[in-house]
Image (tube, rainbow, N blue to C red):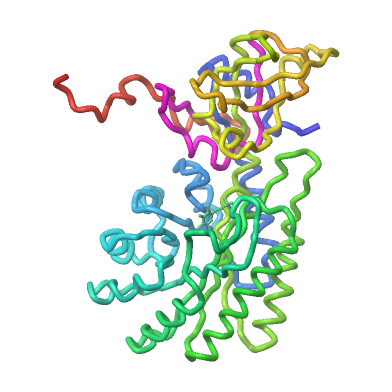
Amino acid sequence: MKKITIAENKIRETVKKYGTPFHIYDERIIVDRLNNLISSFNWVDFKEYFAIKANPNPHILKIMKENSCGVDAATVTEIQLAEEVGFSGEDIMFTSNLTTVDAYQYAVDRGCIINIDWAADIYELFENDIIPENICFRLNPGSIENEIMGDSKESKFGSTAEQIKDAVAFLKEQGINSIGLHTMVVSNENSSDIFGEYTEMIFEFAREIISEFKVEIDFINIGGGIGIPYQEDQVVDVKAIAAEVKGSYDKVLKANGLQPKIFMESGRYITGESGYLVTEVIKEKETYKKYLGVDASMSDLMRPAMYRSYHHLTNIDAEARAEKEFENYDVVGSLCENNDKFAIDRRLPKSKLGDLIVIHDTGAHGHAMGFNYNGMLKNGEFLYTIDGEVKQIRRDENFKDYTNTIIGGY
Ligand SMILES: *Cc1c(COP(=O)(O)O)cnc(C)c1O
């Protein structure tokens, strides 16, 4: 049975004090995953840049800072958020796409690492006298397949090897002799083999660039994409993933006297399992199927609706009653969209009005993907700290927040 790592009485106290629904994150899990990732890559000069988009709450970003990580920002707003927490300069990797000159200017002025998606942008930057100190190029290898990311050739991200080579030749003419390389081709990937496969490809590309252009590759950012065991029987072995990467690194780079740093920008792996969405059963309904209506909706957690992803559910009240009977339910939110379902035909202990249902693994791409469609107000977030305290880190939105940007006079 999938365990809830946060003490049940702490969850119940939070429900009593603040009501449902809310996300609560277990700091111990976040720190554990960070330590596991970092120690798995202790064979190389390694740094994790946490992908802000996975969980952009500044209290969460602060945990990354306390654990010597950087952050990966995709937009100027995410850079600003990182700055609020005290990240600066090279601790911020700016991995954007369709990037405007203004956005580059903002990031370059702050000394961020500039991870360039469309290699030809470099010519525009130099024309505008925007000269980044740290330049990195995002490679689209065109030949790797993964379930969420799909076929790289169909991916809008990155540039081809040839385009990057042209850009490197240009930089070389401008007197720039050191760059970084990046690729991100997998998402929620549990098998370690593919990490060996695509890192070998990007390492080979690095070697080619070095020998062809006599430039230094300072670091290679191998992206995020490490999965988490959403299903109980899944296993994600980060040590095995790191061993695959080491295999490629030793074979392609180290054996040739090259030792660039390795960066990752994991999001899901770091915070995904730390989060729980706590929601209450507010309606039982039976038509052609049995429904459990809960007070959370896909505006709190979009993954099941968007990707049909599995999130484990625990009815903690039915467990407390030691409920023996089971039923198949669709567990649904109240949005006027038929895909607002957390689970379809899920076998759960017989549930009652008022039961608390805990939805697992909501710490990444959960609250972060929230929206206000249908007048859904975004719900609060809590941190269960290492000291065992529950700290409110975001309040619920209210009607005033919802209408705040509307111009009056109607
Ligand atoms: C989304 C994203 C990540 C984080 O991915 P996870 O699957 O959460 O690890 C990292 N880098 C880039 C460029 C991304 O778009």
Query: From which residue to which does the magenta span run?
Result: 354-380
Q: Is residue 88 magenta?
A: no
The x, y position of residue 393, in whole percent, is 47, 33
Nearest the camera: 100 or 10?
100
Against 217, residue 275 (above or below) is above
The residue drawn where x is 49% and y is 73% is 160
The x, y position of residue 168, in whole percent, is 42, 82
Quadrant field for ligand 1: bottom right
The quarter of the displayed image where residue 329 is located: top right
In-image side of 78 versus 21 (left or right): left
The quarter of the displayed image where residue 372 is located: top left
Nearest the camera: 92 or 7?
92
Q: Is residue 92 visible?
A: no
Nearest the camera: 15 or 247?
247
The x, y position of residue 47, in whole percent, is 56, 64
Location of the C terminus (image quadrant): top left
Q: Residue furthest left?
A: 409
The residue drawn where x is 58% and y is 57% is 224
Against 314, residue 134 (above or below) is below
Nearest the camera: 286 or 178?
286
The residue drawn where x is 26% and y is 60% is 102
Q: Residue furthest right?
A: 324
The residue drawn where x is 77% and y is 13% is 350
Location of the N terminus (image quadrant): top right
Against 311, residue 71 (above or below) is below
Q: Is residue 19 visible?
A: yes
In-image side of 234 versus 159 (left or right): right
The x, y position of residue 309, in whole percent, is 65, 38
The quarter of the displayed image where residue 104 is located: bottom left
Numbered circles on residues, count: 0
